[in-house]
Image (cartoon, coloured by chain):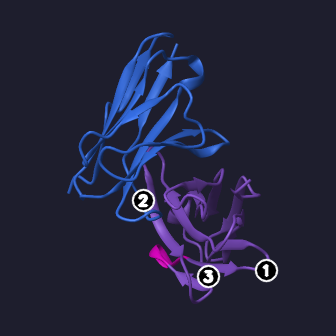
Amino acid sequence: NAGVTQTPKFRVLKTGQSMTLLCAQDMNHEYMYWYRQDPGMGLRLIHYSVGEGTTAKGEVPDGYNVSRLKKQNFLLGLESAAPSQTSVYFCASSPIPGELFFGEGSRLTVL
Amino acid sequence: AQSVAQPEDQVNVAEGNPLTVKCTYSVSGNPYLFWYVQYPNRGLQFLLKYITGDNLVKGSYGFEAEFNKSQTSFHLKKPSALVSDSALYFCAVRLYSSASKIIFGSGTRLSIRP
């Protein structure tokens, strides 16, 4: 009953460091999404994927890169972290666009 | 620009009273609309959706939502609030121009007092 699993759940970075957030889903969903959640701003779409080997930009893609080499995994990378990227990151998957299944979130702090 | 708006940051309701959480949208074409709920330190959970058909849709935990095309609204409702309904609620829309993009509103915190 794993659903959508995000790792790590917490991370502290220094400005300029790089890291990768991993999202894994075991529901064989085609669509996967990365969102960031900030107080008063709701969820903003960073990148998404409509299937293995595909990625597309969302509302706030700058400073992030993604890859979907395997259908079940969607990776979000920060090449050079900035304090503005301090946020809670949520991954979601969907069999069709709309009814999303979310992970528990990854809290990232950039000092 | 295509968007979804939740005009109230917070809604306070007494237990047992009806509740409404408002959502308005601005999208091209026929919208696909959704409501999600988020409990503290958790991911979002799907509540209900409107795709087509009956303007009143029913969802999880006794919630329902009314689609109003002329007012471009999709308000979330419940006839009798429970303390356990206290949470953060998000309205979302699937964009017509890019069917894979799901855009969320800023969220409304619902607080139910005993």
Q: Distance between the residues labelled 1 and 2?
A: 27 Å
Could you tell me residue B79's position as x and y percent?
Answer: 61, 82
Classify residue A29 by image quadrant: bottom left
The colour assigned to chain A within the rendered structure: blue
Q: Which residue is drawn at 75% across and 57% down?
A: B8
- Disc 3 marks which amino acid? Pro
* Disc 2 target residue: A100
Number of marks present in the image shown: 3
Q: Which residue is drawn at 72% across and 52% down?
A: B9
Give the mark nearer the N terminus: 3 vs 1: 1
Secondary structure beneath dot 3 equals: loop
State which quarter of the image contains the C terminus of chain B. bottom right
Could you tell me residue B56's position as x and y percent?
Answer: 60, 85
Does residue B51 appear left or right of residue A67 in this picture?
Answer: right
Residue B79 shows which numbered tag?
Answer: 3
Magenta segment includes B53: no
Q: Numbered disc 3: what chain?
A: B
Q: Nearer the viewer, residue A89 or A31?
A: A31
Which one is closest to the eye, mark 2 or mark 3?
2
- Disc 2 marks which amino acid? Leu
